[in-house]
C-alpha cells in the first residue's frame, strides 16, 4: 500500500480547520444593525436605542424595547421555523399566511365563551349546537389538525406529483384563504374562553417561539430527520440513491410547516382575542424573509434554526428601530424589501466564492 | 447449493423510446471479479441502476444470493448486501464526510422513528477507519464536501462501500477522476476485496486496470451484452473489437 505521511491516509480531524458557520455572519449583522440604530439614536433623537436612559426605571438595558422587539416577531418566527425546514429541503411554502387565517377562524370558533358579561354569547359560531365553553383541548386539536391537513396536502402534492412547491403551496395559499372567508361568511370570530385567551397572553408568544425553536433546532442537528432534510435539499438524487424515502420525508416536512403555521394561528388569535378572515396576510413572505436573512439558502441544503432566529431578531430590530427613529412605516417596508434581496445576493456571492476556491 | 451471487435474466430498461438496456443475461459467482466494458451510452450504468433498484426495470428477473428479488428501492438492495459506487457518486454536497458515508443508514443512539438521535461519534470513528483504506487526503472530514476536489469526492464515495461489509460491490468508473496514487489505492481496495473473497462488478474504460484485476469481462454495446470473455482467453485488442462492434461472440450473434 502506498504510504502517506499524514497519519492515517492523510486524514485529520482538526477542529481549527472548520469553516466559519454562516450564523456568525448573521449575528455580526445583527450587532451591526443595532449599533447603527444606537448611533442614529444619539445623533437624531438624543436617546439610546438599546440602553435604559430613564431615571425612574432600573437596569442597564431598555427592557421594554427588547421585549417588544422579540414579541413582535415571535408569531411569524414560529412560522419561519417551519418554513426554514421546507426551504432546506429545496422547497418553498407560500401557504403559511393563509393557513394562519383559516386555522385562526376555525380554532377560534371552537373556543367561544358561552357568556359575555353575564349575557349569553349568542354570536358564538356554534351557539345553537351548544358548542361553547368547550375544554381548551378541543380548539387546540381542531386548530392543529387544520395545519396538519393543509401541510399534509402540500407535502403530498410536492412529494408525489411533479407540481413544483411554488405552485402547490400557491394553490394552498388561495384555497386556505377561501376557507377562512367562507367559514363565517367573512364575520370575525371574537370572545374566546379565558383558557384560550391565556395561550397568547403577555410574553407567551415569545416562550412558545423559544421552545419551538429549541425543539426543531435540536431535531435538525441531532436526528435522522434533520440529516435527511439537509440531504434532500443538497442533492435529491443522492438522497434517493442512498435509500432515503424522499417523497415521504417531504410530506413530513411540509406537515410540520403546516402544523407550526397552525400554532402561530392559535397564538395570534388568542393574543388578539379575535380571529378574522384576513389574518396572516403576507406572513409567509415575512417568514421566508426571516429565514433568508438568517442564512437559509433558497437553493436548499443550507441554513439553520439558529440562523432563522437571528434573522427574526434582525427583522424585529429593524421594525423597532424605525419606530424609534419615528420614521414612516413606508420606509420600513422598502428597507425590508432591500434587505431580503440583499440577503439572497449575499448567499449567492458566498456560494460563488466557495466554488471558485475549489477550482484553484 | 449454488455459489452464484447475482444473476439477471432478460433484464431490460426502456426510457420511453430509448432502449438503454435490452435482454441482459448476466451472472457473477462468489468471489468473482467481473469487469463491464463498453462505449459511452452502452447501457452500463443503466444496468447498475436496475440491479440496485435505483430505477424500476421495464422487464426481467433478478436473483441475489440465491433468492429471487424485487427490491423496492436502493436501501433494500443495500441491506441485502449490494454496495455501490455510482458514477454520479450520489453524494450530498452540503453534508460532511461521515454524514455522506452513513446517509440513509445512520447510526443512532436512541431509536425514535424519524426523530432517532444520531450517534455522531460512532459514525466519525467508522469513517476514519473506512477512509484509512482509501488513503485519501482530506483536510477535515467535518467540512461539507462541496469544497472538495473531484478525486476526494470520489474517494469518499468509495470509502462508503469500503466501510460496510457486503456480498457484492459495484463500482461504476471509480477511478475516472483520480490521480495516479489514488488510483493505486482504489486498485488496492479491489485486491483486498478479492482476498476477502467478495464479489465485485467493476465498470471501467481502463483496459490495463481490467486486465490486471478482473477475472472476466462482459462487453455491452448499444444496450446489449455482446461478449462474455474470460481474461485468460482474451487480450486487449480482442476486447476492443467487441466494444466497437468489429466482432460479436457466437452466443450473442442475435444481439448485434
Ligand atoms: N433517465 C434517462 N432517460 C432517458 N434516457 C436515458 C436515461 N438514462 C440513460 N439514458 C440513455 O440510456 C443510454 C445508456 O446510458 P448509460 O448511462 O447506461 O450509459 P453508460 O454505458 O453508463 O455510458 P458511460 O460510459 O458514458 O457512463 C444512453 O443512450 C442514455 O442517453
Ligand atoms: Mg455510465
Image: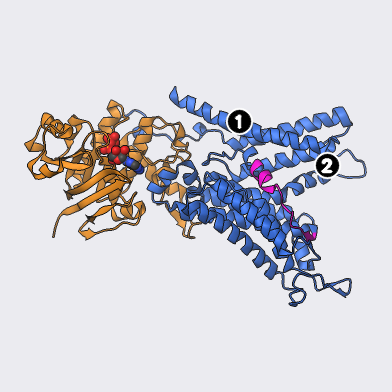
Do residues under tags 1 and 2 come within 8 Å of each other at their CB atoms?
Answer: no
Q: Position of residue B62 (x, y in %)?
A: 23, 55
Q: Position of residue A118 (x, y in %)?
A: 88, 74
Q: Quadrant of residue A184?
A: bottom right
Q: Quadrant of residue A195?
A: bottom right
Q: Residue at x 46, y 34 (%)?
A: B146
Residue designated by label 2:
A62
Any idea which chain is the blue one in this picture? A
Mark 1 chain: A
Q: Please, which residue is most extreme toward the right here?
A: A56
Gap in Å between the C-alphas at discs 1 and 2?
A: 32 Å
| In this view, B194 is above or below B152 | below
Q: Residue at x 55, y 58 (%)?
A: A152
Q: Quadrant of residue B90?
A: top left
Judged from the image, the secondary structure of the residue bearing numbered disc 2 is loop
Q: Residues within 10 Å of mark 2 (few under 14, many from 20)?
A: some
Side of B224 relative to A26 (left or right): left
| In this view, A163 is above or below A183 | above
Q: Position of residue A170 (x, y in %)?
A: 60, 49
- The segment highlighted magenta reads A273-289
Mark 2 chain: A
Residue A219 shows in the view: yes
Give the position of the C terminus of chain A as an image quadrant: top left
Q: Is residue A284 magenta?
A: yes
Any idea which chain is the orange one in this picture? B
Q: Is residue A183 magenta?
A: no
Give the position of the N terminus of chain A as an image quadrant: top left
Side of A195 relative to B71 (left or right): right
Amino acid at each position: 500500500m502506498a504510504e502517506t505521511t499524514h497519519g492515517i491516509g492523510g486524514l485529520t480531524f482538526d477542529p481549527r480547520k472548520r469553516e466559519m458557520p454562516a450564523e456568525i455572519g448573521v449575528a455580526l449583522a445583527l450587532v451591526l444593525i443595532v449599533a447603527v440604530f444606537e448611533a442614529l439614536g444619539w445623533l437624531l433623537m438624543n436617546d439610546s436605542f438599546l440602553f435604559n436612559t430613564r431615571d425612574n426605571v432600573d437596569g442597564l438595558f431598555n427592557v421594554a424595547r427588547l421585549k417588544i422587539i422579540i414579541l413582535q416577531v415571535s408569531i411569524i418566527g414560529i412560522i419561519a421555523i417551519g418554513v426554514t425546514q421546507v426551504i432546506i429541503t429545496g422547497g418553498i411554502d407560500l401557504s403559511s399566511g393563509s393557513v394562519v387565517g383559516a386555522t385562526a377562524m376555525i380554532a377560534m370558533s371552537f373556543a367561544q365563551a358561552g357568556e359575555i358579561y353575564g349575557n349569553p354569547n349568542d354570536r358564538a359560531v356554534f351557539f345553537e349546537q351548544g358548542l361553547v365553553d368547550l375544554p381548551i383541548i378541543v380548539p387546540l386539536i381542531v386548530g392543529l389538525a387544520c395545519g396538519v391537513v393543509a401541510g399534509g396536502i402540500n407535502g403530498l402534492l410536492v412529494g408525489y406529483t411533479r407540481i413544483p412547491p411554488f405552485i402547490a403551496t400557491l394553490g394552498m395559499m388561495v384555497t386556505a384563504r377561501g376557507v377562512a372567508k367562507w367559514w363565517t361568511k367573512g364575520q370575525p370570530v371574537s370572545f374566546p374562553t379565558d383558557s384560550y385567551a391565556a395561550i397568547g397572553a403577555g410574553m407567551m408568544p415569545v416562550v412558545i417561539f423559544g421552545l419551538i425553536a429549541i425543539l426543531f433546532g435540536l431535531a435538525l442537528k441531532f436526528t435522522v430527520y434533520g440529516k435527511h432534510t439537509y440531504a434532500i435539499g443538497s442533492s435529491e438524487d443522492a438522497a434517493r440513491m442512498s435509500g432515503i424515502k424522499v417523497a415521504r420525508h417531504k410530506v413530513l416536512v411540509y406537515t410540520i410547516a403546516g402544523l407550526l403555521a397552525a400554532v402561530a394561528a392559535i397564538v395570534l388569535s388568542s393574543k388578539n382575542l379575535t380571529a378574522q378572515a384576513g389574518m396572516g396576510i403576507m406572513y409567509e413572505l415575512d417568514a421566508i424573509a426571516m429565514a433568508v436573512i438568517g442564512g437559509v439558502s433558497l437553493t436548499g441544503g443550507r441554513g439553520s434554526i439558529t440562523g432563522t432566529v437571528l434573522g427574526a431578531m434582525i427583522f424585529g430590530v429593524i421594525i423597532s428601530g424605525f419606530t424609534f427613529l419615528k420614521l414612516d412605516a413606508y420606509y420600513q417596508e422598502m428597507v425590508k424589501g432591500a434587505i431580503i434581496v440583499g440577503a439572497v445576493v449575499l448567499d449567492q456571492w458566498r456560494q460563488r466564492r466557495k466554488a471558485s476556491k475549489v477550482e484553484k | 447449493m449454488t455459489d452464484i451471487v447475482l444473476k439477471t435474466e432478460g433484464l431490460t430498461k426502456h426510457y420511453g423510446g430509448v432502449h438503454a438496456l435490452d435482454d441482459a443475461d448476466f451472472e457473477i459467482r462468489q468471489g468473482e471479479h467481473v469487469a463491464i466494458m463498453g462505449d459511452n451510452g452502452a447501457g452500463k450504468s443503466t444496468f447498475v441502476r436496475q440491479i440496485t433498484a435505483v430505477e424500476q426495470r421495464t422487464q426481467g428477473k433478478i436473483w441475489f444470493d440465491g433468492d429471487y428479488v424485487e427490491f423496492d428501492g436502493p436501501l433494500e438492495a443495500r441491506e441485502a448486501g449490494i454496495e455501490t459506487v455510482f458514477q454520479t457518486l450520489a453524494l450530498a454536497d452540503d453534508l460532511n464526510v461521515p454524514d455522506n458515508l452513513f446517509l440513509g443508514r445512520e447510526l443512532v443512539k436512541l431509536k425514535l422513528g424519524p426523530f432517532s438521535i444520531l450517534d455522531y461519534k460512532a459514525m466519525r470513528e467508522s469513517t476514519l477507519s473506512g477512509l484509512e483504506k482509501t488513503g485519501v487526503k482530506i483536510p477535515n472530514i467535518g467540512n461539507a464536501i462541496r469544497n472538495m476536489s473531484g478525486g476526494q469526492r470520489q474517494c469518499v464515495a468509495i470509502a462508503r462501500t469500503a466501510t460496510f461489509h457486503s456480498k457484492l460491490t459495484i463500482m461504476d468508473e471509480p477511478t475516472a477522476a483520480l490521480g495516479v496514487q489514488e488510483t493505486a489505492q482504489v486498485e488496492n481496495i479491489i485486491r483486498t476485496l478479492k482476498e476477502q473473497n467478495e464479489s465485485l462488478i467493476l465498470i471501467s474504460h481502463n483496459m490495463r486496470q481490467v486486465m490486471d484485476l478482473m477475472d472476466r469481462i462482459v462487453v455491452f454495446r448499444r444496450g446489449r451484452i455482446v461478449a462474455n470473455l474470460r481474461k485468460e482467453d482474451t487480450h486487449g485488442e480482442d476486447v476492443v473489437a467487441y466494444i466497437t462492434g468489429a466482432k460479436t461472440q457466437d452466443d450473442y450473434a442475435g444481439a448485434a
